[in-house]
Image (tube, grey):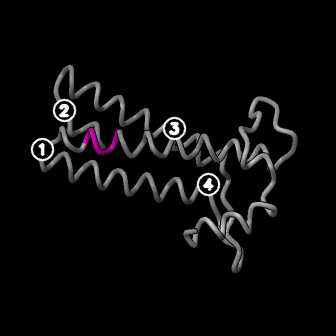
Amino acid sequence: MKPYAVAALLLAPLVPFSVWANSNCDKPRNDFDGLYCLNKVYIEADKELNENYGKLRGMLDEAGKKTLRSGQLRWMEQRNSECSRREGTRFFVNLDCAANTTIERAQFLQNRIRECNSAGCQNSKLD
């Protein structure tokens, strides 16, 4: 048996059943189930954001790629400052904020893709 499979079997009794089963995200039973569901939304939003970024980047000229990259880095800094904080050795993330901000950014990138496909890429709108 592979080492990671053994670790999963050993840790399985320590993980709540809701992690292993499809959680009812419409009516979470407690805060941890709600967090689990919100994390699933964030992961999907992040996946869409990365797909949109890659697709848009492939449509741009070199100047557009540079503008897109700098805008993305600024967006990441803003997201991090608005949705997380440090207190000593602890790090806190407002997952609702992170998910919503990521969904908005993924939509922004999708809108730029739509523009590239219809009217041509407009580097001025990437920043």
Q: Which residue is mark 2?
A: 121
**Is residue 12 one of those drawn in magenta?**
no
Q: Amino acid at mark 1?
A: Asp
Crowding near the residue tagged with mark 2, few <14, some 14–19, many ≥20 C-alpha atoms within 10 Å: some
124, 55: nearer the viewer: 55
Region of the chain picked out in magenta, as a range: 52-56
In the image, farthest residue toward the front: 1
Q: Amino acid at mark 4?
A: Cys
- Going from N to C along the chain, the mark reached first, 1 or 2, is 1
The percent coordinates of residue 61 (x first, y second) are: 12, 44
CA gap, disc 1 to disc 2? 9 Å
Q: Could you tell me if the residues under marks 1 and 2 are in contact, i.e. CB atoms within 8 Å?
A: yes
Q: Which residue is mark 4?
A: 83
* Tag 3 residue: 103
**Labels 4 & 1 near each other (Cβ < 8 A):** no
For disc 1, the neighbor class at 10 Å (few under 14, some 14 to 19, many from 20) is few
Image quadrant for the C terminus? Answer: top left
